[in-house]
Amino acid sequence: MFNFSPGPAVLPQAVLEQARDELLDWQGTGMSVMEMSHRSKEFIAIAEAAQADLRGLLAIPANYKVLFLQGGATAQFAMVPMNLLHGKKSADYIHTGEWAKKAIAEAAKYCSVNVAASSADRNFSYVPKQAAWKLGPDSAYVHITSNETIGGIEYHWLPDAGGVPLVADMSSHILARPLNVSKFGLIYAGAQKNIGPAGLTIVIVREDLIGQAVTGTPAMFDYKIHADNESMYNTPPTYALYIAGLVFQWLKKMGGLGHMERVNLLKAGLIYEFLDASRFFSSPVAKDDRSIMNIPFRLRDDALDEEFLKQAKARGLMQLKGHRSVGGMRASIYNAMPVEGVKALVQFMREFEARYG
């Protein structure tokens, strides 16, 4: 069975097997990680190793804090303006789809949102070019959704934020390729797509940007409090953090993010090559902006959608239905999706087209 779910999503088999083997007894402690105190030396060692491995994978500079939080990327939609406005009244947002839309709506509760660019004119099927952006003269930061899980668009270039912090929601493609963290003021990502199980959120924030939260910010929404307490101001999502740590170890064993980028480009290329050659299937996304993680596609006759999903499931190709807001199909091919799974999908699509096309 190959799981193409957009999240919670597929995890590496080796990680699941290790978690299974350690479920009742983590390294001779007689306890499951789920039972450990987050203050115990055993769990602190797990958390410290996870942070060190993540720092190594992304080459995170020393002047950035790594926070393990809760609330998903959705909580970050509010936490970002609460912590980064720094007395300013506005922020720039680039509107590229459903998740950018949600981030904009939440930020509007705390500041004036300047939608500096939008791809709404073409149904969010592309990333607006930098030349089309109209950044505000006194904005606190620029926010992008660097990969839209639903629409399947991805930034393959680094925006220029004009001297203010660049903030990115990277939930669905973080760790898919190497990244120059120093070009960003803050990066956040829900773990349940390309890192681990639901319940954990990762924030990577430049140290000088924290400590100036707006008056009235709850303690749980203040980055400085979490940084000062090593992400243990309250009980963290301990088991989710443990699994994320295993994923980081797996990525290191696989050869790091350079290797993963090559594999991910190969996987995405197999699907896009087929879509571009097909008269029965199509991709709704501009070629230059296609995601290598989330690939939406459509059948020429959407009356066949349910039959496609039924037959795909019978072949062990699961969770291919597109998001309810856009319809169609979507294959999410995160790091843990093997090349064999993508090949099986393309072969099925080829056979389905031969039968119904």
Image (tube, rainbow, N blue to C red):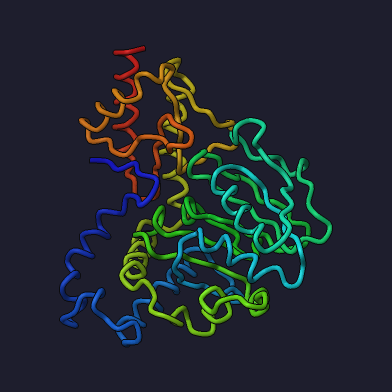
Q: Which part of the image, by quadrant, shows the C terminus?
A: top left
Q: Residue 271: x percent and y percent?
A: 42, 31
For this rendering, which residue is in front, 165 or 117?
117
Q: Which part of the image, by quadrant, shows the N terminus?
A: top left
Total number of numbered discs in the rendering:
0
Please give left or right for residue 90 compared with residue 232 in the image. Answer: right
Please give left or right for residue 130 compared with residue 101 in the image. Answer: right
Q: Residue 91: x percent and y percent?
A: 72, 59
Quadrant of residue 68 within the rendered picture: bottom left
Quadrant of residue 89 within the rendered picture: bottom right
State the residue at coordinates (32%, 81%). Answer: 43
Please give left or right for residue 63 compared with residue 317 in the image. Answer: right
State the residue at coordinates (15%, 81%). Answer: 30
State the residue at coordinates (74%, 48%). Answer: 116
For this rendering, which residue is in front, 29 or 152?
152
Q: Residue 103: x percent and y percent?
A: 59, 54
Query: Above or below — where is 99 with respect to 356?
Result: below
Q: Residue 51: x percent and y percent?
A: 44, 73
State the residue at coordinates (20%, 30%). Answer: 314
